[in-house]
Image (cartoon, rainbow, N blue to C red):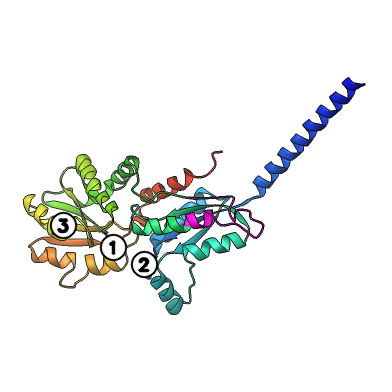
Amino acid sequence: MIWKNTIFFILLVVVVLVLTSFQVYAAEQQEKSAILIAAFGTSYHEAAVSIENVVKAAQQAFPEQTVVLSYGSRTIRNILKERDGVSIDSPMSALAKLADEGYGSVVVQPLQIMSGSEFHEILSITNAFRTMNDPHYQPIFSRIEIGDPLLTNEADYEKVVVALENDMKQYTSSAGEVLVLVGHGTEHPANSCYSQLQNMLQKHYGPKVLVGTIEGYPTIEDILSQLKAMNAQRVTLKTFMLVAGDHARNDIAGDEADSWKTVLKKAGYEVQATLDGLGENDQMVQIWIEHIKDLLPKK
């Protein structure tokens, strides 16, 4: 009799464990998950296509996920709301809405080039939500992760080098032609990514490609000295930013006296500028998509 009771007890435990596991599995399967695309933003309709391309790529790559867009710049959000009647949430308000709508798992993917100040601002917001609990002292999100910016590890740089191959062929095929990539630049130590990128680009393509910044190092003066040393004749300026917005249209390609195009023309170079952001290059977009994929459960 004892033996039969023992068998019955074991079977009961097994059934309970199986049912519990199934319930946990079912709950996990039903958990709502989302991807939050966190861009700085742009008020230029023509430039917004770069951000839209990333959102569309994420929707195509992860159809089971809800993809949400946020803009970090309050100024740009206010312009869009007042001028166009368009409301785009900040990363903080977007995360709050996802929590309120019952999403359990969230991947935040910043669209920054490097892990500079803007990236760390989004990182701080993500970490803050990671520590928040609901009224029942349960985490607001069962899981919240943040993806890497465009240039994080060596493999990212190598992918960027490959993604610029068509630009190299188009703008540096003749003697005296040089492609100059112009990034935003920052006082943050992460600004060193531009020098690393130039080193890797020149290792792959030779000296006919340079990288400069508007607000960091290398400066336009540094670019001018390099162009002089290489006897350049024709220069193509290409925006190395997610979008070709205000900086691209004014600081780089504008007609103002201090724009890169004007300064280089005065120095005697034939100059042209492209008005396309990195988000218009599908190979660049895929780098951000891969960073999202790295954080999602493997199937």
- Reading the image, the residue beneath label 2 is 46
What's the magenta region?
Answer: 126-145
Question: Residue under circle 3?
Answer: 235
- Residue 222: horizontal and vertical position, in percent? 13, 56
Determine if residue 253 is in view. no
Marker disc for residue 275 = 1
> Image quarter for residue 12?
top right
Q: Are marks 3 and 1 in contact (CB under 8 Å)?
A: no
Amino acid beneath label 3: Val
Left/right placement of residue 111 relative to residue 269 reads right
Residue ID at (19%, 57%): 236
Q: CA distance from mark 3 to mark 2?
A: 24 Å
Which label is found at residue 13?
A: none
- What kind of residue is marked 1? Leu
* Mark 1 or mark 2, earlier in chain: 2
Q: Earlier in the sequence, mark 3 or mark 2?
A: 2
Q: Are marks 1 and 2 in contact (CB under 8 Å)?
A: yes
Question: In terms of secondary structure, where does tag 3 sit?
Answer: strand
Q: Residue at x 22, y 62 (%)?
A: 214
